[in-house]
Image: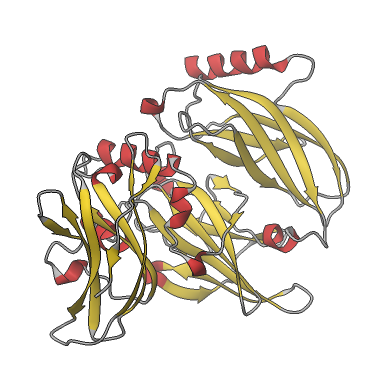
């Protein structure tokens, strides 16, 4: 309660001529509306956690916005509506689902209207709303903190959610070895569109990674999906709960690794490191070297990467364990464990037998990088050898 009071006082101090927690907007029923919340964040980075604000439209609470105090972020976007035509009042308040952070002060709220014909309209119109996993409410564990969308060549839109970690599913050693990360990147929802922009086929990633037709409820055209499993799979029906409505960033990861999204948002790695430490998992994203490659291994081969230290010692991403090799095609990232102060003099990729079979590999090496103490991406300039 004390923190919430301090939070409200901070809002009042920041208000000036206009209450920065309130904004009015006129809309049409077909409009997509993006609410932007600008903040001043004085929370120390070593206190990084997840908080929330609550969005109210015309006096009714609609959903929450996840806030990451200490991340360096100064602005948060969320979808509202669609709303019936006319004037509406939007207000942002402390959320009842998480304790407020007094170091975060709202400085401005604004609403942007996106109408049919705008290049972003369909991207926003079909963005899923997410109901948080019930056991994560009130915590900073397994939080969905970023969503991105890709335009797929067959006139599809694919939405993917990045979670801070996963409490179940792939263990952390394998996450780093095979995926080059400890946060959880999960395909969420895909819609195939006809020539008029109507969704003619909709699917989502259900439990056990099964791609499943969507038949759930909606907010306007927005599908509602519930995070339902310990490894952050979704269902299209479930009890009501704390809901978020992210605004996705647009990416084209078919030309690079999915993990490259993390490189542009280094606060994600810092937040994941905090969660790993809180859960006593003996890993830190800064204690690895990361290698990207475009890989073709087929059914009878596997791939792993290696780096060579200044003392000549070679360390491999798979640690000599076939279960930690890469067995999928496409752009991949792996992580090689290496002390932060260790130099890298050489790096490369290996083509390995799979289940006793030896087949050909095609590996096009990409970038090699590591994270600084403050989680900034640093590219390593050494030649990367292909097998």
Q: Is residue 268 visible?
A: yes
Instruction: Relative to 357, say whether 341 is above or below.
Output: above
Find residue 126 and report its horizontal and vertical position in percent: 67, 62
Please tell me which residue is depicted at 75% across the width and 72% down the height of the picture: 197
Please tell me which residue is depicted at 25% across the width and 49% down the height of the picture: 288
In terms of depth relative to the viewer, which is nearer, 270 or 66?
270
- Quarter location, residue 250: bottom right
Please tell me which residue is depicted at 10% across the width and 54% down the height of the picture: 312
Find residue 47 and report its horizontal and vertical position in percent: 38, 26
Q: In which quarter of the image is the C terminus?
A: bottom left
Find residue 90 and report its horizontal and vertical position in percent: 75, 35
Instruction: Relative to 123, say whether 48 is above or below.
Output: above
Q: Is residue 8 left or right of residue 330?
A: right
Q: Is residue 131 visible?
A: no
Instruction: Relative to 354, say whether 48 is above or below.
Output: above
In terms of depth relative to the viewer, which is nearer, 380 or 323?
380
Find residue 360 and report its horizontal and vertical position in percent: 26, 86
In terms of depth relative to the viewer, which is nearer, 347 or 273?
347
Please tell me which residue is depicted at 22% across the width and 45% down the height of the picture: 283
């Amino acid at each position: 309660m004390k923190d919430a009071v301090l939070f409200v006082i901070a809002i009042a101090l920041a208000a000036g001529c206009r209450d920065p927690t309130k904004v009015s907007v006129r809309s049409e029923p077909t409009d997509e509306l993006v609410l932007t919340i600008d903040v001043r964040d004085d929370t120390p980075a070593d206190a990084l956690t997840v908080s929330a604000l609550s969005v109210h439209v015309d006096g009714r609470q609609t959903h929450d916005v996840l806030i990451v105090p200490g991340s360096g972020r100064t602005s948060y976007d969320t979808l509202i509506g669609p709303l019936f035509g006319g004037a509406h009042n939007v207000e942002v308040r402390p959320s009842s689902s998480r304790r407020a952070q007094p170091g975060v002060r709202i400085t401005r709220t604004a609403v942007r209207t996106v109408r049919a014909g705008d290049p972003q309209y369909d991207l926003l119109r079909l963005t899923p709303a997410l109901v948080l996993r019930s056991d994560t409410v009130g915590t900073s564990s397994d939080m969905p903190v970023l969503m991105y969308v890709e335009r797929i060549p067959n006139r599809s839109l694919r939405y993917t959610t990045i979670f801070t970690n996963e409490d179940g599913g792939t263990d952390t050693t394998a996450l780093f070895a095979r995926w080059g990360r400890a946060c959880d990147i999960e395909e969420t929802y895909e819609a195939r569109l006809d020539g008029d922009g109507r969704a003619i086929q909709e699917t989502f990633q259900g439990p056990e990674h099964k791609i499943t037709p969507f038949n759930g409820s909606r907010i306007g055209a927005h599908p509602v999906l519930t995070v339902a499993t310990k490894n952050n799979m979704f269902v299209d029906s479930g009890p009501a709960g704390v809901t978020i409505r992210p605004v996705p960033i647009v990416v084209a990861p078919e030309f690079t690794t999915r993990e490259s999204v993390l490189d542009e948002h280094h606060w994600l790695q810092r937040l994941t490191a905090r969660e790993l430490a809180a859960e006593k998992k003996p890993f830190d994203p800064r204690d690895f070297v990361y290698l990207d490659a475009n890989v073709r291994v087929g059914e009878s081969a596997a791939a792993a990467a290696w780096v060579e230290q200044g003392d000549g010692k070679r360390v491999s991403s798979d640690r000599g364990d076939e279960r930690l090799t890469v067995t999928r095609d496409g752009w991949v990232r792996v992580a090689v464990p290496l002390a932060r102060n260790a130099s890298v003099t050489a790096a490369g990729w290996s083509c390995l037998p799979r289940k006793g079979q030896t087949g050909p590999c095609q590996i096009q090496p990409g970038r090699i990088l590591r994270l600084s103490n403050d989680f900034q991406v640093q590219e390593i300039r050494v030649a990367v050898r292909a097998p």
